[in-house]
Image (cartoon, grey):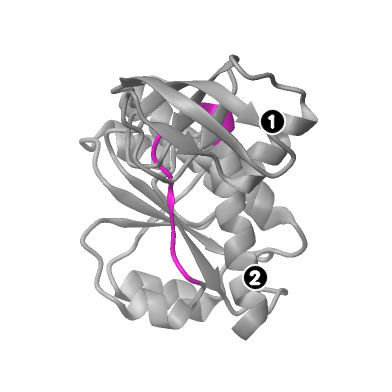
Amino acid sequence: MPRFYCPQPLIPGAIVDLPEAVAHHLHVVRQQAGDEVVLFNGEGGQARARLREIGKRRASADIVAFEDADVELPYPVTLAQGLPEGSKMDWIIEKAVELGVAAVQPLAAARSVVKLSGERAEKRQAHWEGVIVAASEQSGRNRLALLSPLQDFSRYIAQPSDQPRILLSPRATQSLAGWARNTQPQAVTLLIGPEGGFSAAEEEAALAQGALALSMGPRVLRTETAGLAALATLNAVWSGE
């Protein structure tokens, strides 16, 4: 059954106006009045709804029933990702959401090729929020991952953290999998550098702030691979996924 994000109360018996983007999608794929869809508002749970009317820019639906469905990980994972080049960030966010990441923190690191600020940064932020919505619709998640504004790495790492920060580094002597097997599931942050990784100064700053250096093995992973592999590793060890 098609799933769509609808950021408003989803109360059984109510009639809701669907977002314009959803209405356009329904029109394009030729959905008909009477067809059933699933709606979620990002706050948990989902609703079965029956399409009431469909136009090119407007559509409405009757909320039939609400289901308290939740597929979130029991240990929130934040992906603190150094900005990569091109459209790699889109792909990283999309796949991280599919794997269950709870929050994404874009970082402007020393080796980040892409430089964003002002209006350009705001546009990318809005675009990434759209990526999160689309990935949530596809993957069955009913809560949206939190996307924080782009932040300079040095400023970010200087802030205190209430959860362990894991710095993935090929120079680390302890593996992420080994650490996870001996640690109770908990909220963590994965620090992932851009192409070329974090600089030596950035790694030192992270370690000075209490970050834990862990390795994904003897091979050097690309920036678009490292965070996703780490998230999958935690899922495998902590929840058997």
Residue under the point 51% across and 58% down: 171
The image shows residue 28, relative to residue 130, as above or below, that is: above
Q: Position of residue 236 (x, y in %)?
A: 42, 25
Viewer-side residue, 111 vs 170: 111
Residue beneath disc 2: 123
> Which of the pair 66/96 is nearer the observer?
66
Position of 34 compared to 154: left or right? Answer: right
Query: Which labelled disc corresponds to residue 26?
Result: 1
Residue situated in front as seen by the camera: 3 or 241 = 3
Label 2 CA crowd tier, 10 Å (few <14, some 14–19, many 20+): few
Give me the residue at 48% from left, 76% from top.
153
Tell me the amino acid under the disc marked 2. Answer: Lys
Residue 208 sits in quarter: bottom left
State the extent of the magenta-drawn residues as a range.
137-149
User: Would residue 221 be seen by someone viewing this image from the given angle?
Assistant: no
> Percent position (x, y) of residue 93?
58, 49
